[in-house]
Amino acid sequence: MKNILITGTSSGIGYAIAKKLAASGFEVYAGVRKKDDFDKLDKIDNITAVMLDIENKDDLERVGKLFEDKRLDVLINNAGIGVPGAMIEISKKDLEKQFNVNVFSTLMMIQAVRDSFIRDKSHIITISSINGHLTTPFGGAYTMSKFALESMHEALRAELKAFGIKISIINPGQYRTDIFDKLKEAYISISKNSKYYSEVFDKLKNFNSQVGRDTEFIAEDVLSVINSEKPPFRLISAADHEKEWAYNAIIKRLRDLLANSSGITLEEYIK
């Protein structure tokens, strides 16, 4: 039985992944920050709840020690936040919070268990976002952090290859989670204080939290990646139209790069 550590499992995508993997026979160590979530998850068969705030150094050290004498087959980095706002207005404090959770603390989580996963030749899976490829207005801070996360894992992939470590990034599109309820609260606050975009943010607070795919789809994708003999480095877990948006964004950047650096088109480059 494989031991799997997952961060950010209290709700949404993380919760769905934890339940799916536990039901599939894996021993899941589910990281949560609140006692109520701990109790909820700890009751589920094959799940051991773990108090884990990836911003908390003591929590990271304690979880690192947990796997000193037991295998760590898979680490799934799911914990993350989204801080909305316009680039010309967002505060340094909000930017720092965005990057501290999504990038810096994710790396600290990886470092906290590095001895274990190097020893066990483990698999690191990180839940990024389709916004690791596709930039959206008023989500620039979040998008920046996901682009950084992509780069970080490209470095990890190259550096850890010699140890037999597998690296996978999963890029979810829009899923039905409580993140939209949190965004609504943020938009209400921003709309009151924004000098330039108050009307925009006032409209954004009406986002429908039921739009998007059920989290069961991404849980199935994660299970497939874990069970794969040759797991992909990147996997976009999204509806077809969202995948098309991401692919077009990637192609557009490549077109711009080629046009600006060499004066040739993408089609000419491929030929």
Image (tube, rainbow, N blue to C red):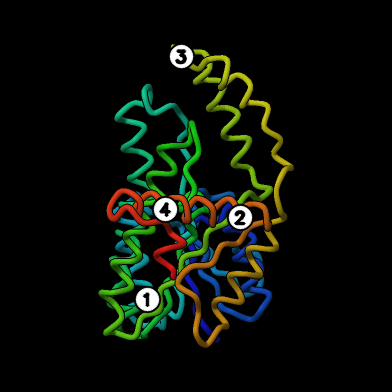
Residue 5 disc label: none
How dense is the environment of label 1, judged by Cα within 10 Å: few (below 14), some, or many (20 and up)?
A: some
What amino acid is found at the position of numbered circle 3 in the picture?
A: Tyr
Q: Are marks 1 and 2 in contact (CB under 8 Å)?
A: no
Relative to 77, say whether 114 is above or below. below
| Of the image marks 3 and 1, the number of the one nearer the N terminus | 1
Mark closest to the chain's N terminus, 4 or 1: 1
User: Tag 3's secondary structure?
Assistant: loop
* Residue 78 x/y as whole percent: 49, 58
Residue at mark 4 to residue at mark 1: CA–CA distance? 46 Å
Q: Nearer the viewer, mark 2 or mark 4?
A: 4
**Whether residue 105 is visible:** no
Q: Which residue is mark 1?
A: 67
Q: Which residue is mark 3?
A: 196
Q: Secondary structure at mark 4?
A: helix
Residue 18 position, x and y percent, is: 60, 66
The residue lying toward the viewer, choosing from 55 and 12, is 12
Relative height, residue 139 to residue 26 (above, below): above
The mark closer to the camera, 4 or 3, is 4
| Residue 137: image location, x then y, percent | 49, 33
* Mark identifier at residue 244: 2
The local secondary structure at tag 1 comes to loop
Residue 83 in which image quadrant? top left
Q: Which residue position is annotated with label 4?
A: 255
C-alpha span from label 2 to label 4: 16 Å
Q: Earlier in the sequence, mark 2 or mark 4?
A: 2
Q: Quadrant of the N terminus?
A: bottom right
Mark 3 to mark 1: distance in Å? 50 Å
Q: How crowded is the residue under tag 3: few (<14 C-alpha within 10 Å), some, or many (20+)?
A: few
Circles 3 and 1 in contact, beta carbons < 8 Å: no
Looking at the rendered image, the disc whose residue lies closer to the viewer, 4 or 1, is: 4
The amino acid at mark 4 is: Arg
